[in-house]
Image (cartoon, helix red, strand yellow):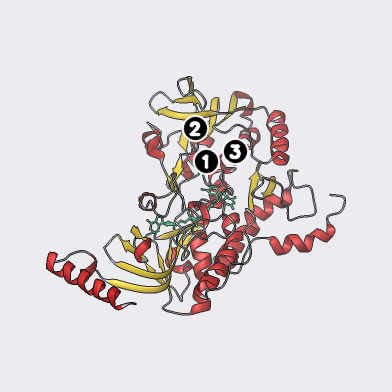
Amino acid sequence: MSSVGQVLKVSQSALKLSVRPLSTSFTNRQKEHCKILVVGGGTGGCSVAAKLSSKFGKGNVIVLDPAERHYYQPMFTLVGGGIKSLGSSYKSMKSVLPKNAKWIQEKAKEFHPDKNTVITSSGQEINYDILLVAMGLHLNYEKIPGLVEALSIPNGNVGSNYSPDHVDKTYSALKRVDKGNAIFTMPTGSIKCPGAPQKAVYISEDYLRRTNKRKNVNVIYNTSIANIFGVKKYADALWKLVEKRDIKVNLKTNLVEVKPHKNIAVFANVENPNDKFEIEYSMLHAVPPMSPPGELKQCKELVNELGFVEVNKDTMQHLKYSNVFAIGDCSSSPNSKTAAAAAAQSPIVYDHILATLNGKPLKGVYDGYASCPLVTGYHKCILAEFDYNLQPLETFPVSQDKERYSMFIMKKDFMPPLYWHLMLNGYWNGPGMMRKAMSIFKFGK
Ligand SMILES: Cc1cc2nc3c(=O)[nH]c(=O)nc-3n(C[C@H](O)[C@H](O)[C@H](O)COP(=O)(O)OP(=O)(O)OC[C@H]3O[C@@H](n4cnc5c(N)ncnc54)[C@H](O)[C@@H]3O)c2cc1C
């Protein structure tokens, strides 16, 4: 630093002391420094923290996350259908975070990327060389008037697979339906696993068939988006499926209010919000609108206008701060927000963090891979896999737009251990290698 800079620094701190002799801000905070700070110990954060802390050893990686439990959220679809228990969807955060990383069980409250610091909810200041933001998406149930109350009614008929607090209510509501309208929703905006709202439809419809109640129940899927699925190959298969199973799909139709005491759901046309209609439900599966967590959205230097960390979609590096990266649902990369996407991002993020620390160029590109096991019933699943361009990027040498028992078993029995034992320990980077190996069997597919 130049002597002018030194003088400036000294005089600034002297000024600080003279202006605030009883300072309660930065000067009195408990301070930590680390090489890498990972904010969020969910799917993406935990898997990259595992890779980094095994590379750098103890004392170099801090994971900041207030949660007591780490949920394997893809399991919620099966919990909502009564196929798995809620207990099988989580482990304690302590047991899954890497042993070489230091866990600070607090929220990130403020981000100061110009100072390379994050302030925690108790006021600790954590200084980092590299920041990885992995805070996922926040569920905004309160944005739909009446929904929080509807979900709080004991033995009610409204459930939501998206939250561990409400997922059990889906199956208990389903078991009680014997007539009327079973309604399923999909909100506007970016959500995690955009296929999950319709998985709830198919499993419930299959349940009603198996229990001989289907003929008395209308199954209705009201979705805010303009197609049943974003990738044509799977959308074509799903349109055939809903037609065959007499599931009514209303596009561009958004849940805007619930009247819990009358069992009424109010929907609006996405293109003309004043165009509303009411429908009485005997069961409602509601998916809330989502957004990045508020603490992140507040830091305008880090995020885009919707609150997502503004990264280069190929490298996952921040557009302005080269020592900041994002992974998973809170990043601005326009992939489908899934754990599968976070798995495919994880080796890229890891390599690019190492390159940045070593002053090397970033090599390797994330292709937008995401996958969505569209569970279509108690024994069937269509495994959708695709890239940024919404083109299929399939792993197996079979037509993946067909419903298959094998894919259902993979979703139910194979993926959970893969997640807990490989992905969270930093050993699963998505099926890219498998896809290459399988490609030799793909002729004639
Ligand atoms: C019903 C459902 C079904 C799904 N099905 C599938 C599927 O079949 N396949 C698939 O691939 N994906 C699926 N997903 C999506 C998948 O679970 C997510 O995409 C994935 O978990 C995202 O990982 P993440 O690390 O970005 O966020 P998360 O795993 O959600 O982790 C975010 C972490 O950030 C922490 N956090 C939040 N705010 C703060 C803060 N202020 N300070 C510090 N920490 C904070 C949270 O406590 C949390 O631990 C499904 C999700 C749901 C809900």
Instruction: Residue lying at the far right in this picture: please name it.
Output: 444
Which residue shows up at 34% across the image and 60% down it?
112
Element type at mark 3: helix
Q: What residue sits right under mark 3 in the picture?
A: 198
The quadrant in which residue 120 appears is bottom left
Residue kind at label 3, given as amino acid type:
Gln
**Image quadrant for the N terminus?**
bottom left
Secondary structure beneath label 2: strand
Instruction: Kindly indicate the quadrant of the structure image that contains residue 207.
Output: top right
Q: Position of residue 242 (x, y in %)?
A: 68, 31
Q: SS class of the residue under badge 1?
A: helix
- Please give the residue where the numbered disc 1 appears in the rendered image: 171
Tag 3 and tag 1, C-beta contact below 8 Å: no
Q: Residues within 10 Å of mark 2 (few under 14, many from 20)?
A: many
Going by the numbered disc 2, the residue's amino acid type is: Leu
Q: Is residue 370 above or below residue 32?
A: above
Q: Which residue has dot 2 on it?
A: 284
- Does residue 373 appear in the picture of this structure? yes
